[in-house]
Image (spheres, grey):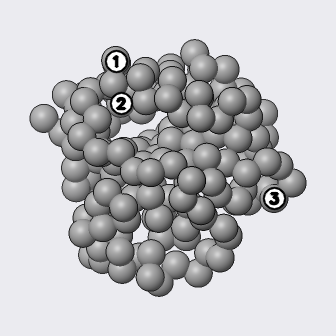
Amino acid sequence: MNTAHLLIGGNEGNRKLELRQALANIEKSCGRILQQSSVYETAPWGNHDQPNFLNLAISLQTNLKPRELMQEILRIEESMGRKRLEKYGPRTIDIDILFFNECIIDEPGLRIPHPEIPNRRFALVPLDEIASGLIHPLFHKSIHELLSECSDELDVKKI
């Protein structure tokens, strides 16, 4: 059995409904959700000219391997209307694998841990809520330590 930490977010459509649907789809096809953070409204990162996002983090117990989990996540995003039109653009749903066990994977289409974790407050805040002591396998620091060192100043508000 594997443990993955995912970040789920979106800024198009009924954002709360999209998050609930993503959670149901993940539990149906990927595994059992062990923990779920609060929902956070977050300023867009990378492209500021778009609506705010709703984000949450989960801890997932799964029998899938990392590549299988990624393929299932992409299928879920597509089934929920995700269109990849522009980098950092608006989207109905976005599901990122932040961590998978203690794996370090750097392959085309699959990088674990997610390379931007230390730079993104919108990922660190919800992850800190459910896994503050989780150690990043490359930086050898806890999520809480990475959050305290994060230079990203964009708004992240619990709703």
Residue at x 73% of width, y 29% of height? 13
Does any portion of residue 80 appear in the rendered image? yes
Name the disc covering residue 69, or none.
2
Q: Dot 1: what SS?
A: helix
Q: Quadrant of residue 45?
A: bottom right
Front position in the image: 150 or 16: 16
Q: Depth-wise, is mark 2 or mark 3 nearer the camera?
A: 3
Task: Evaluate if marks 2 and 3 touch, with contact meaning CB atoms under 8 Å apart.
Answer: no
In whole angstroms, how far apart are the C-alphas of marks 3 and 1?
Answer: 33 Å
Dot 2 crowding, Cα within 10 Å, few <14, some 14–19, many 20+: many
Where residue 141 appears, as percent x and y from the top left, is 30, 77
- Residue hosting label 1: 28
The quadrant of the rendering that contains the N terminus is: top left
Residue at x 59% of width, y 28% of height? 17
The mark nearer the N terminus, 2 or 1, is 1
The mark nearer the N terminus, 2 or 3, is 3
Front position in the image: 47 or 56: 56
Q: For this view, does 22 lie left or right of residue 12?
A: left
Q: Quadrant of residue 138?
A: bottom left
- Residue hosting label 3: 48
| Residue 39 vertical placement versus 77 (above, below) | below
